[in-house]
Image (cartoon, coloured by chain):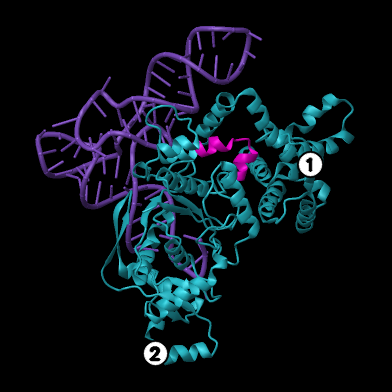
Amino acid sequence: MKVRTRVAPSPTGDPHVGTAYVALINYCLARKHGGEFILRIEDTDRARSTPASEIAILDSLHWLGLSWDEGPDIGGPHGPYRQSERSAIYQEYMQRLLSEGHAFKCFCTQERLEEMRIAQRAAHQPSRYDGVCLTYSPEEVARREAAGEPYVVRLKVPNEGICVVEDSRRGPIEFEWKAVDMQVLMKSDGLPTYHLANVVDDHLMEITHVVRGEEWVSSAPKHLLLYRYFGWEPPKFTHLPLLRNPDKSKLSKRKNPTGILFYRRMGYLPEALLNFLGLLANSATEGDEVMSLQEMTARFDLEHVSVGGPVFDVSKLDWLNGRYLREVLDLRGFMERAGSWGFAPDRLERIASLAQPRVERLSDLGPLVAFLFSGRLAISAEALRSGKLDDAALREALTFALREVDTLPEFTAVALDTMFKGIAEETGRKVRDLARPFYVAITGSPTSLPLYDSMELLGRDLVRERLRGALDVLEKAS
RNA sequence: GGCGCCAUCGUCUAUCGGUUAGGACAUCGCCCUUUCAAGGCGGAAAGACGGGUUCGAUUCCCGUUGGCGCUACCA
């Protein structure tokens, strides 16, 4: 049987390095065995999914050099590859579960469910749907439905016995059925949850190996149950460890840059980042650690993928990236990379237009624009404090902006202008007073190129990092 | 609270019962060198703890501890 793997990101934010990690491993597994690798968009969460995020994810994976055989952008024989376009399919399978008695409609309110969970926790019980709606007669269900009561569809889960999940790296994992929740399969908006959509799609798309993050281990029994109810052969499961912060907690945006875009803007080469991620999965036990995607694929071995959560060690990434920059690339290649990273003609033009009015000598250019070609900035608390804001106000403003920066739909000078006016209004300060420390945080100097344009030029990820850096400086100085 | 996963140098890891526990990053020292890097050489650095099983456990089993995940009409 042909090996078919997939990566199924949810388009709900910036493309995450964890997604790249999972994608890489799925890619290698498929390619290694001459199989196919599929990209599927899991956008069943109507409230959080955005087209912009989907585009960013596809772009990021492409940038890394990964390609897929089927996906929303290129189509394929098992499409559509966007779950929001497959509602009719899920509806059909949902009906089947319902008519065969493997699922049931649940009319319980959020409030009641909340109370139930609190009670269960207090009683040292596992959190699980208590089955109230399971006791309703067909007439009762019909009556409630006719009355327009909103409902969800839940999976019927046995009360006895154990479920054994076979994980290729962890062996059999046992769960007691009575501790497995009767998961919602279809939300009241008629869209499926991940659990239903993922099982139906993996089957229909003929996925043979499901390699996904460790956070799915505990819902694997539900998935297995669905395969059983449908009478389908389940795929082989492998759960990958979650990438960690240096303090071993799950890699998070609060503590670390987690976005692929950040590493790109920071000047890491895609092949270095990919190489680094690959080393986390299969370490090079012999020979050089610098490896192309082809080499990584050739030596890939699912049986030897590590299951201990690895710390995302930036200093090793730095070393690897350095080797690519100075050893793998020749001078011409180096120039090309540098050019496309920060010296593209349109970017240069934009920068020049901002700098031209502010110079008396061409030699003023260096110090004036250096911050646009830098990563993190070495700034002092004194410089940040040079304006009218005291420490508390500074912190408040920076924190405020940090949050706002992530919610801006478009990261442009115009949007940033509006954002700063908003912050000024909410904090009762003049934009002028407010902006001064931001010049220091973003450009490294209280006098520089226009702030909003500079921020746009730097991009969301670097801006986030510099704001965070400024906050750190204040923290350490207080 | 419940359930589950994980556990070798600071970090990523090798070891699939018998090794002086190996490599890489970082770190320290030396060399090279007009500076700084890079590079070369060398050093320091690990089996969480307690029980078993075994002639012998880092390796297999159990417990403890610790870390992590899940515990949503999010994925």
**Magenta run includes residue A57:** no
Question: x%, y% of residue A199?
Answer: 43, 64
Amino acid, disc 1: Gly
Is residue A19 toward the left or the right of residue A103 in the image? right
Q: Which residues are drawn in magenta?
A: A261-275
Q: Nearer the viewer, residue A466 or A435?
A: A466
Rendered-image quadrant of the C terminus of chain A: top right
Q: Which chain does tag 1 point to?
A: A
Give the image quarter of residue A87.
Answer: bottom right
* Mark 2 crowdedness (10 Å alpha carbons): few <14, some 14-19, many ≥20: few
**Res A313 visible:** no
Determine which residue is flagged by label 1.
A387
**Res A398 visible:** yes
Q: Which chain is purple?
A: B
Residue displayed at 87% across by 30% down = A359
**A248 is higher (above) or lower (below) than A79:** above
For the image shown, how many numbered marks are present on the structure? 2
Is the stretch drawn in magenta largely helix, strand or loop?
helix
Amino acid, disc 2: Ser
Q: Which chain is cyan?
A: A
Cα distance, mark 2 to mark 1?
71 Å
Identify the secondary structure beneath mark 1.
loop
Q: Which chain does tag 2 point to?
A: A
**A201 is higher (above) or lower (below) than B22:** below
Residue displayed at 78% across by 28% down = A367
Determine which residue is flagged by label 2.
A137
Question: x%, y% of residue A183?
Answer: 42, 70
Pointer 2 and pointer 1 on the same chain: yes
Identify the secondary structure beneath mark 2.
loop
